[in-house]
Amino acid sequence: MKKILLLLIQFAVLSASAQTDTTELQTDSVEVQIIALPDSTAIGTPDGKLVSKEIGPAGGKIVSEDGRVELNFPEGALSANTTISIQPIVNLIPNGNGKAYRFEPSGIQFNKPVQIIFHYTDEEAETCPPELKFMALQDDKGKWEYMGYSDWDSTTKSLKGFISHFSAFLDGNEMELSPTDKTAKVGESFPLSLTVVGAPGEDELPPLPVSISGRKTVWSVAGGAKFGSIRRGTTQYSATYVAPNYLPKGNTKVVLKVNQTTIREVVQRSKNWRGVTLIPTTTTLATFTCNINLYDEYKIDINAEGKSVLECGAELSDKSSFEIILYPDKKPEFGNIKNEPPTLTKKPNCKPLQYTTDGCPGPVDVQSSSLMGWGITYPPTEVTLQFRSVILKIVNYTDKGPNELHDFPHTDIDASIANKIKFKPDRTSQTYTLTESKCNLGITITPL
């Protein structure tokens, strides 16, 4: 773990600065959030499919069901045929990268070191550079041992190390932004800071220098201002993300780059002059990201008043309401749906026709399962919700009598309305009316 600490110190002693949309802000001191890694924890519970394979003295390979972890047994590592298994388990340590993995049989010792390979994704490399990752092993008593990988390969996106016995395994990030993932509503803000894990058993981390000449950090929002902005935080090495007022199209990421500027001396000669030119070169030491899932939320009230399919001057009233969560790139989520029963506001004026609304849904009946289409125009100027037209029982009726002159409505009629709703997702309250199927519709949009 001392090797890890050296890496941490090298990167943690950075001159901090933050960047807004147009101006870079600098400060001469550093403040990072240091998180202590636990000496021991409980053993994680199963969190995935167990994979088993028999491997003998000739060696072999086994890969976890999700393809993330690979064990390579060299010839002679095992003295006899042995059933080897990999079981994903819940990660219980800070800065752990996804799931942990339990290797069985627990406690088995190998005649030769077994290679362990962890396969990371591009997104995980953005969260923490591969060269700043560590591996952790946990014995059957819950005690953790932390160490660095022996090698990493950016082409195959793999980290490689060696183990001499079986226990639980976990890949971790020595440094990362906190949070690394965040769900936020448009218009909201939240703080970010760089977190560094500290090694258990060490008395303390060495003091951090006040500043180092030539190093600086640059905060930004990928894609520009339409995805939000960054402003300097109250801590020395932190920032605050401010979400845009409208949903952008695509994913949102906050990026922190750690740069270092070095000066190269170049000797130049000419006919009348000989001297040294100083050429500055900026190198990015590390890049960290926070992935942000933005959403917007509204309540929609629908009020229908009018004739609909009723005859002889009869009219009804029907109301529905629901809440909807909008995302830039996936289906909206519905909640708190309320469909009130319809009521007769005017009775039919020709006997013997009578209407009753008992047990009837009425012409407005919102069901999330009937959503057949949605869309957001960009810049977000309009949201469209298209519901499937369904057969609804508007009313019950009786029309038996000697003086019957009309063919009155059937009991079940395809008369659902308010199947297409449009509004502006601009965080303002909106009310509009329209006429549909002989009903006046009042639709109110309220931001939540």
Image: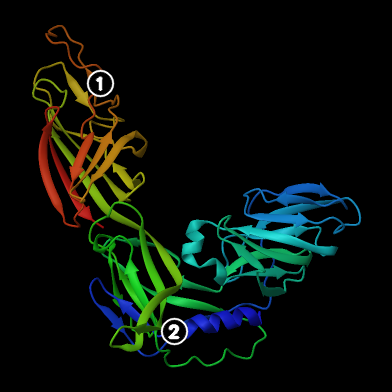
Going by the image, does 278 lie left or right of 409? Answer: right
- Secondary structure category for the residue under label 1: loop
The residue located at (63%, 91%) in the rendering is 203
Residue that label 1 marks: 413
Q: Residue furthest front?
A: 271
Is residue 374 or residue 390 the one in the foreground?
374
Going by the image, does 346 lie left or right of 330? Answer: left
Sequence-first tag of 1 and 2: 2
Residue 26, placed above or below residue 339: below
The numbered disc on residue 14 is 2
Label 1 vs label 2: CA separation? Answer: 71 Å
Where's the C terminus, which quadrant? Answer: bottom left
Residue neighbourhood size for the residue with mark 2, other residues' Cα within 10 Å, grouped as few (<14), some (14–19), many (≥20): many
Quadrant in the rendering for residue 148: bottom right
- Secondary structure category for the residue under label 2: loop
Residue 362, placed above or below residue 354: below
Is residue 382 or residue 29 the one in the foreground?
29
Is residue 43 or residue 394 the one in the foreground?
43
Where's the N terminus, which quadrant? Answer: bottom right
Name the amino acid type tagged 2: Leu
Q: How is the image coloured?
A: rainbow
Name the amino acid type tagged 1: Ile
Residue 323 coordinates in the image, percent (x, y): 29, 49
Going by the image, does 389 lie left or right of 111? Answer: left
